Amino acid sequence: MRLIRRHVDLVLMLILGLIFLLFPTLDLTVSGWFYQPSLGFFLAKETLFVFLYELVPAMVHLLEIALPLIILLSFNPLQRYLVAHRKPAVYLALVLLLGPGLLVNEVFKNHWDRARPKQIVEFGGDKIFTAAGVPSDQCERNCSFVCGHASMGFYFLSFGYLFPRQRRRWLGIGIGLGGLIGLARIAQGAHFMSDVVFSFFAVYFTAKLVYALIENKERGIQS
């Protein structure tokens, strides 16, 4: 029982994975709420959803510029006040690179080959539906599993590791923002619910692992 409590996040991911495997039509049901045969995914051009879709690349570009800049300037003797921000910037940059960047957009989206909702037969396309987490051959690149845009919302949970006393708050912010962006992508027919769920876990475990590695390295140096 103690082991389960220590790894409740991993247990939760496994349970959800099992649910989506045993009940794959759950994804179809949720996506079906936003689809009509005569209209397609009728909320695809909803103003808020389009705004969220366009906001994500802007967020990425801002972070891609700001984080390396902070790290580089922190070595400048004239910018000594940035030294204290170097470690947090390195951490955030690593999570961004390894989580939304490598794991989500390169490993999963380009190698799991799951067709998007709007591409499958059930929603007017010509591709075959695949259950969450199951490698497929219905898409070549930039595929459905997992949700890249939502991963950038979930990315904000990583700030909780920089502010331990506010970790739950940042976790809530990350889940809220990632969930909202994920909802937009589901409504647009671009992703299934499970794509969003496992996008969260991809970013969550990346943030957790990177933080643990940095902390362990510092302890090793100090000892």
Image: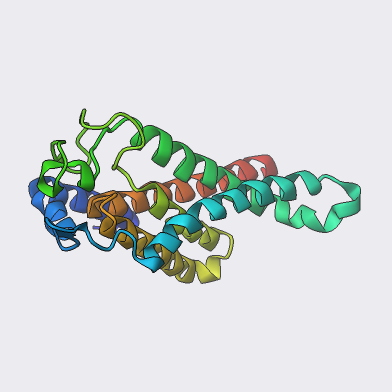
Task: State whether residue 155 appears in this view.
Answer: no
Q: Which quarter of the rendering shows the N terminus?
A: bottom left
Q: Which quarter of the rendering shows the C terminus?
A: top right
Residue at 52 percent across and 71 percent down: it is 166
Residue at 36 percent across and 53 percent down: it is 200
Residue at 48 percent across and 40 percent down: it is 101
173 or 149: nearer the viewer = 149
Q: Which quarter of the picture shows residue 72? A: top right
**Vertical relation: 110 (above or below) 204:** above
At which x and y percent is residue 185? 32, 56
**Vertical relation: 174 (above or below) 111:** below
**119 horizontally vs 219: left or right:** left
Task: State whether residue 49 appears in this view.
Answer: yes
Residue at 64 percent across and 45 percent down: it is 218
**Vertical relation: 97 (above or below) 152:** above
At which x and y percent is residue 68? 69, 45
At which x and y percent is residue 71? 73, 46
At which x and y percent is residue 147? 34, 48
